[in-house]
Image: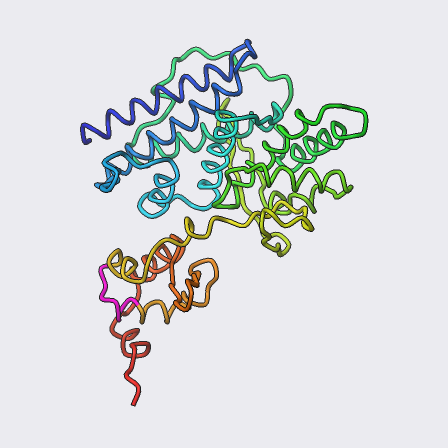
Amino acid sequence: MRRISGLLKDKAISSLRRGTAAFNGVDDDGRQTTVLLHMQHAFEMLLKAALVEEKVKVFDRRRGRSIGFEKCVNLAQEHLGLDEANVGVLRAIDALRDDEQHYLADVSEDILYIHARGAVTLFDELLSNAFAERLADRLPERVLPISTSPPRDLDVLVNEQFQQVHELLKPGKRRRAEARAKLRGLLALEGHISEEALVSERDVNRVERGVRDGKDVSAVFPRLGRVGTQFSYDGPTLKVHFTHGKGAPVRFVSADDPREAAAVREVDLQRKYYISKGDLADRLELTSPKALALRRSLGIDEDEDCVHVFDFDSQKHFRYSDNALRKMQKALKTADMEAIWEEYRPRRKR
């Protein structure tokens, strides 16, 4: 094991222990904040440790500082094999932590529990895959499991919190601040599905308007209907995994659109689509013409989840997302590039 990855791994485990200790604590003062801060930090350190072990750079050369959480997650998808469901857990925890640290967010105890338990499950799996260690080997043998209610599916918990918001926003209640904190918590859960999980005031304003207009949870939070939970027991240990299902088609809207209440946020396109054609070829270790041939064979330039065209005056700039990079990297493992080149290579016009 590399010295740096070992130190990062130890920091990760320390933060996870702190987070679980806070979760199990009987003092509620600042408990939710402490749990989310330590859980998010634990995963950032563990992902960096695993990336360093795989000889992946975790420093931004331009800034001279280590990369942030979002970049860690993207690199983990690329190099550690994290699937979309696990990435969604990390994004949701990060979004909840962001609002809890910088402003106000509120999730029910049950929602906090299944995310904390899901985080422990994922942490153990990452630790095992990257370092052949189990979390149980780094925790005290003593245990006193106490629960006042059994775990319930996420869709049930989301609906309960949505109904609480509806009650708090009724005329004469004077509980708008509490309602908006709960809406922030629900918006943060969209991290399970969306790359853009950070919550803005415009998001909260829009969904509050939807609640006041009498729209139901499926209309205001269509994405959350795609997230499910699976519970399994290994002896006394409860494991929680999040799953993604297919949902109804959704329409992206601007956060400033006053006519639309659905919480389907328009992502920051320049953050999602940031890879140029040249950079994409370099990362794939292909020439630009061969990268073009591979893009054509995979239909990358017709896939809205992979490419976006930015218009600047009369110029058009193609920019690609991490989805395009991962799709092309996966194809290269089994693709016959000679055949792809012969069929899809750029040809001169006569």
> How many marks overall?
0
Above/below status of 234 relative to 333: above
Determine whether, in the image, residue 129 is placed left or right of residue 256. Answer: left
> Residue 252 location, x and y as percent?
58, 54
Q: Is residue 290 magenta?
A: yes
Of 306 and 42, nearer the camera is 306
Determine whether, in the image, residue 300 is placed left or right of residue 239. Answer: left
Above/below status of 221 relative to 20: below
> Residue 131 location, x and y as percent?
28, 32
Of 9 and 106, nearer the camera is 106
Q: Residue reaching furthest front?
A: 313
Q: Residue at x 69, y 37 (%)?
A: 208
Of 217 and 137, nearer the camera is 217
Q: Is residue 98 magenta?
A: no
> Residue 83 location, x and y as percent?
43, 46
Q: Residue at x 18, y 31 (%)?
A: 2
Q: Residue at x 65, y 30 (%)?
A: 180
Quarter of the view holding residue 206: top right
Determine whether, in the image, residue 213 is placed left or right of residue 120. Answer: right
> Residue 10 location, x and y as percent?
29, 22
Above/below status of 324 relative to 122: below
Figure quadrant of the C terminus: bottom left
Figure quadrant of the N terminus: top left
Q: Residue at x 57, y 49 (%)?
A: 245
Quarter of the view holding residue 63: top left
Question: Magenta residues?
Answer: 285-291
Determine whether, in the image, residue 138 is placed left or right of residue 250. Answer: left
**Is the image coloured rainbow, by chain, by secondary structure, or in one colour?**
rainbow
Of 297 and 57, nearer the camera is 57
Above/below status of 265 relative to 91: below
